[in-house]
Image (spheres, helix red, strand yellow):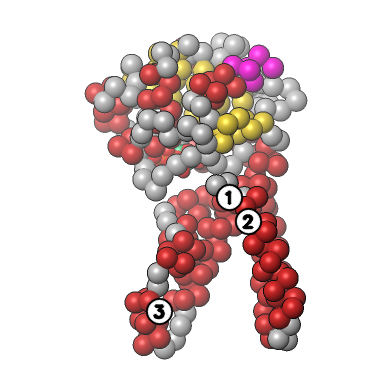
Amino acid sequence: MKIAIVGLGLIGGSLALDLRRLGHTLLGTSRRPETCEQAVALGVVDHASPDLLDMAEADVIVLCPPIEAIAPIAERLIPHLTSSTILTDVGSVKQPIVERISPQWPNFVGGHPMAGTAEQGLEAAQRDLFVGRPYVLTPTESTPQESVETMMEVVRSLQSTIHICDPAEHDRAVAWISHLPVMVSAALIAACTGEVDANVRELAQALASSGFKDTSRVGGGNPELGLMMAQHNTAALLAALTQYRTQLDRCIANIQNSNWVELEAWLVQTQQERPKYIKP
Ligand code: NAP
């Protein structure tokens, strides 16, 4: 197939590397002409052009720019596509994107590969990034089955695990396991920073070890990502944060009331639940 990648960064570049190795012809475009040149020089794509409309000849176009650019780029491309062209994206939030693009292009299959690194840009692109990782597809009732099957074949060829789900359910699920942890972890760091006694604060910084490293990692990451989650998955994130506050209140009340039996039951339950989320 002829596959076009729009946005040659970490995800777009990594997809291009794998899909080209699998024998597809890869076209690519990016915001900066230098990135297009670099993508050809590095063998990430066969042909690159700074002109978005040069991607219209592909059979499948994968939109991989920052999330807010996905729908506007789709809208620029749509008037130039033939009806069989499959549009897909990799955005980390699905409902607003699917709701905006699907009515304009029935052959749009929303997607979200659940893989990444802390790095950004084409230099960070790597082979096999998606192997063994979940890859969500969010077709709607009106998405042609043939297009869904083509996308399933592409995802399978990357050796990812396919999950087909409703866009809103996807957004609620990632709010729990990805977006809530970023805010909770950021709040943890902010709370520690709020220690008014400078000696205690510095001692805490000196003593911090693996537990703090694990629990603060996602809150100490790229601020743009956290902002993107809050701006594009607002309702689901607020619902998750509210439920989290309820759990914190319950924890505080149990400690204030020396209700050790209930606190222990709560901790036993969380210990039992964790393996359902973290596979060995
Ligand atoms: P990234 O490394 O910053 O790559 C995005 C690339 O898009 C940039 O390198 C930029 O390249 C290019 N770009 C920016 N604006 C553009 C525009 N208007 N038109 C065309 N290209 C444009 O970011 P990423 O991590 O790959 O994320 C890209 C998408 O993947 C996002 O929608 C994100 O939600 C999704 N995603 C990310 C992860 C993750 O963990 N990082 C995981 C799953 C999904 P130049 O400026 O060099 O041209």
SS of the residue at dot 3?
Answer: helix
> In this rendering, would 248 be left or right of 212?
right
- Magenta highlight: main SS: helix
| Quarter of the view holding residue 79 | top right
The magenta region covers 145-151
Please rate how many residues cluster around mark 1, counting C-alpha atoms within 10 Å: few if below 14, some from 14 to 19, many from 20.
Answer: few
Q: Which residue is mark 1?
A: 278
The one of 231 and 176 positioned closer to us in this rendering: 176
Check disc 3 and give the amino acid type: Ala
Q: Is mark 1 within 8 Å of ligand 1?
A: no
**Where in the figure is residue 219, as x and y percent of width and height?**
47, 61
**Where in the figure is residue 4, as x and y percent of width and height?**
44, 20
Q: Residue at x 33, y 16 (%)?
A: 46
**Real-space Cα separation, disc 3 to disc 1, in angstroms:** 28 Å
Q: Which residue is mark 3?
A: 204
**Where in the figure is residue 185, as x and y percent of width and height?**
51, 63
* The stretch drawn in magenta includes residue 28: no
**Real-space Cα separation, disc 2 to disc 3, in angstroms:** 27 Å
